[in-house]
Image (tube, rainbow, N blue to C red):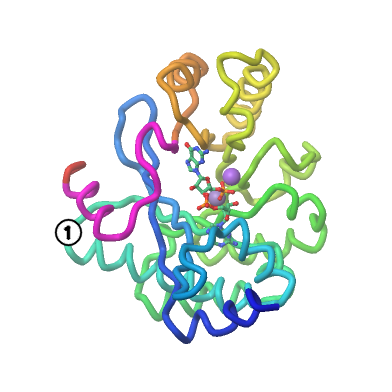
Amino acid sequence: LYLENQLRKALGQDEFQLFYQPQYALNTGKLIGAEALIRWQNKELGLVSPDRFIPLAESTGLILPIGEWVLYEACRQIKTWHDDGLDLPRMGVNVAGQQVQHGDIVHTVKRVLEATSLDPMYLELEITESFIMRQAEEAISTLRALKELGVTLAIDDFGTGYSSLSYLKILPINKLKVDRSFVKDIPNDKNSEAIVRAVIVLGKSLQLEVIAEGVETDAQEAFLKSEACDEVQGFYYSRPVPADEFTKILQLSM
Ligand code: G
Ligand code: G
Ligand code: MN
Ligand code: NA
């Protein structure tokens, strides 16, 4: 309850911050996007991991205002970079299932895009595979409406949520994000390699982009290259960093 009370006050006290992790095209090495990741710095609790407070935010409904803040801040930030002449082709934002289910996510996204004057093509919403598959029937019309706003959609944590392949075909999805739990055990675990290889082939057959998350080693990158994975993200390239540090990454990539 203490954590919950602190979380309730966090938005008003300006305790959230977004970090950004770069994403790269594997064949060219070009920076192709960033994922926005929330951080909570509390005076008494210190830095609280999203693994701890996002589930709490979901169970209390606080995820709705927090999620809206994340969307706004991520869009405002990429717009600022663009206005400063820094090229960043895409900003990925994590969207919790509850935002799709109970929040008016379509209007929220529309409102945020208008408020920040951001062209929707720069915004990519990441929705977890497990949520999409649990709520496929209900989620599909919302996903279609989001797609119609002009944003792109990615399935996050792909491979962990028991996707029905028939849903994949009808969902308006642009990208699969291969969950880092599979990337982690490359090249030692042949089953992980087989799963990652299969997801890359699946993505290509369905004309979806595929990004591998959690790339930490040279050997993992080599494997993904040999399987012609499109894009990569992970500590091997960069940890998630604050906006001012990401500005430097952008400047160096130009
Ligand atoms: O950044 P980190 O790796 O610690 O994130 C841990 C978890 O929290 C990940 O599953 C990530 O998707 C989730 N997460 C990070 N930022 C956000 C956010 O802004 N919204 C939601 N819904 N989840 C987030
Ligand atoms: O669930 P989601 O994919 O949004 O999770 C993103 C989380 O993964 C963030 O918390 C981020 O800090 C973390 N992350 C990003 N790159 C790596 C990596 O190379 N290794 C590990 N272990 N975690 C990573
Ligand atoms: Mn994500
Ligand atoms: Na993920």
Q: Position of residue 236 (x, y in %)?
A: 39, 31
Q: Say if residue 80 shows up in the picture.
A: yes
Q: Position of residue 213 (x, y in %)?
A: 52, 37
Q: Looking at the picture, does residue 219 appear above or below residue 235?
A: above
| Residue at (41, 68) in percent of width and height | 17
- Dot 1 alpha-carbon crowd within 10 angstroms: few under 14, some 14 to 19, many 20 or more: few
Q: Magenta stretch: residue 248 in it?
A: yes
How many labels sit on residues? 1
In this rendering, would 52 be left or right of 210? right
Q: Say if residue 104 shows up in the picture.
A: no
Q: Is mark 1 within 8 Å of ligand 1?
A: no
Amino acid, disc 1: Gly
Q: Position of residue 64 (x, y in %)?
A: 62, 76
In this rendering, would 164 be left or right of 96? right
Residue that protrudes farthest toward the front in the picture: 44
Q: Secondary structure at mark 1?
A: loop
| Residue at (48, 21) in percent of width and height | 220
Q: If the image is split into quadrants, where does the C terminus sit?
A: top left
Q: Position of residue 150 (x, y in %)?
A: 49, 62
| Residue at (48, 69) in percent of width and height | 71
Which region is colored magenta? 233-251
Of 26 and 113, which appears nearest the observer?
26
Q: If the image is split into quadrants, where does the N terminus sit?
A: bottom right
Determine the image quadrant of residue 234: top left
| Residue at (64, 63) in percent of width and height | 96
Of 106 and 71, which appears nearest the observer?
71
